[in-house]
Image (spheres, grey):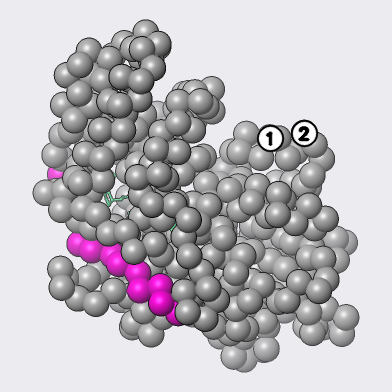
Amino acid sequence: MARQHKSRLLVTGGAGFIGSNFVHYWAKKYPQDRIVVLDALTYAGNLQNLQALLEQDRIRFVKGDICDQALVESILTEEALNLIVHFAAESHVDRSILGPDAFLETNIQGTHSMLKAARKVWLENPVVRDHHRFHHVSTDEVYGSLGATDPAFTETTPYAPNSPYAASKAASDHLVRAYHHTYGLEVTTSNCSNNYGPYHFPEKLIPLALLHMLLGKSVPIYGDGLNIRDWLFVEDHCRGIELVITEGNVGDTYNIGGNCERTNIDLIQTLCNLVDQAFQAKPELAQKYPDSPSATGSGAASLIRYVKDRPGHDRRYAIDARKIFHELGYRPTHSLETGLAQTVHWYLDNESWWKAVMDGSYSRWMDQQYGTAK
Ligand code: NAD
Ligand code: DAU
């Protein structure tokens, strides 16, 4: 979708972690574009993530469900939108294991509802028909789990999703593909590896571990800690999505990743070192977070506890990103070390954000996971 025209975007899930980072990224880069965010504000959605843009009236926010096809059609029509960037989803694997239904509803039915609305509004309108795009944000988890020496996932790796979350995302990817093949809807899909960065909800490994290090709570490591994930700073994911939208081939899928495989235990050790270093550099942190072992000199790593493994826990993910590198010139700009350091500083600078989250839906989740608020 070359940028000879201004875009008018609908960002679904734009109050969540990656969606809100994307809205900030796009609003800064393309200040003339119209951005409408549609988000149901589930436990994972947070208007604080968009506060600055809302206060400046830079975006419109609509609270609503992607399963509400009539609502989506009315937004697309009244705002004359020509680009959908579809992030909205149930995203946490552990929740999908405890309760898969919401994942099927939002990720499969919701994506189908979005596709139906786009088809109706865009393909029946000759003005938009030749100039629209439905970009679907998906995950590397659809490809299943790799052995230690297997080659990384490419765009042609067969789908083999293992968790209810991954299966629901795989189904949504197939629907997106089918709407292109059958109806000619102009779609692109990106499959990205594990993200981290600002506004990350603390049910996921990195923000959970980081905040527990500050508060002196145990850092749970599932199984033997040797599962491998391929980490990408969220802003680099946003840049990859932008490239796919502006330069990618309609109907194609693109893997996005940063060649950054780490075992969970290595990743957490790196994070522990960064937190210890932050306390050494800023003595006032010891007063602010007296329960942190980084304050007393015993070190954040003393909080690590090996706990029961996740059922069906995928051993290794790794993205082969050569297609987006070679075809679209994509390059991540953050290493794990710079991205993690930036993340630690963001959480230290935004205590009111995470305290509000931890007082609310986070503590209910911890109760459900561990039987007690940890
Ligand atoms: P998130 O859980 O932080 O945010 C999801 C957002 O979607 C929330 O704001 C929530 O309120 C909203 N939402 C949920 N159900 C909705 C519904 N029915 N209608 C409208 N809004 C709804 O998720 P995230 O980590 O930001 O992930 C965003 C997307 O990126 C997802 O599609 C996910 O599968 C994909 N993805 C995530 C990662 C990752 O590492 N987090 C990696 C690759 C791909
Ligand atoms: O690969 C992309 C996927 O990455 C996205 O599609 C998902 O939406 C996103 O949640 C993420 O899934 P993971 O399951 O990989 O992320 P999570 O942060 O939950 O876990 C990362 C690894 O850390 C995984 O091997 C499980 C482990 N883990 C997780 C938690 C929450 C722990 O060891 N302890 C924990 O407390």
Query: Up-down: is 261 above or below 62?
Result: below
Residue 127, image quadrant: bottom right
Q: Amino acid at mark 1?
A: Gln
- The answer to whether residue 293 is left or right of residue 55 is left
For label 2, being within 8 Å of ligand 1 is answered: no
| Nearer-the-camera pick, 243 or 282 | 282
For label 1, being within 8 Å of ligand 1 is answered: no
Residue depicted at x 30% and y 67%: 318
| Nearer-the-camera pick, 96 or 331 | 331
Residue 187, percent from left and from top: 62, 78
Label 1 SS: helix
Label 2 SS: helix
Identify the main secondary structure in magenta.
loop
Q: Mark 1 near mark 2, Cβ–Cβ under 8 Å? A: yes
Q: Is residue 56 magenta?
A: no
Residue depicted at x 51% and y 69%: 330
Q: Gap between marks 1 and 2, in whole Å? A: 6 Å
Residue underneath mark 2: 55
Residue underneath mark 1: 51
| Nearer-the-camera pick, 97 or 6 | 6
Which residues, given as a range, are shown in magenta? 308-323
| Nearer-the-camera pick, 360 or 302 | 302
Residue 327, percent from left and from top: 52, 81
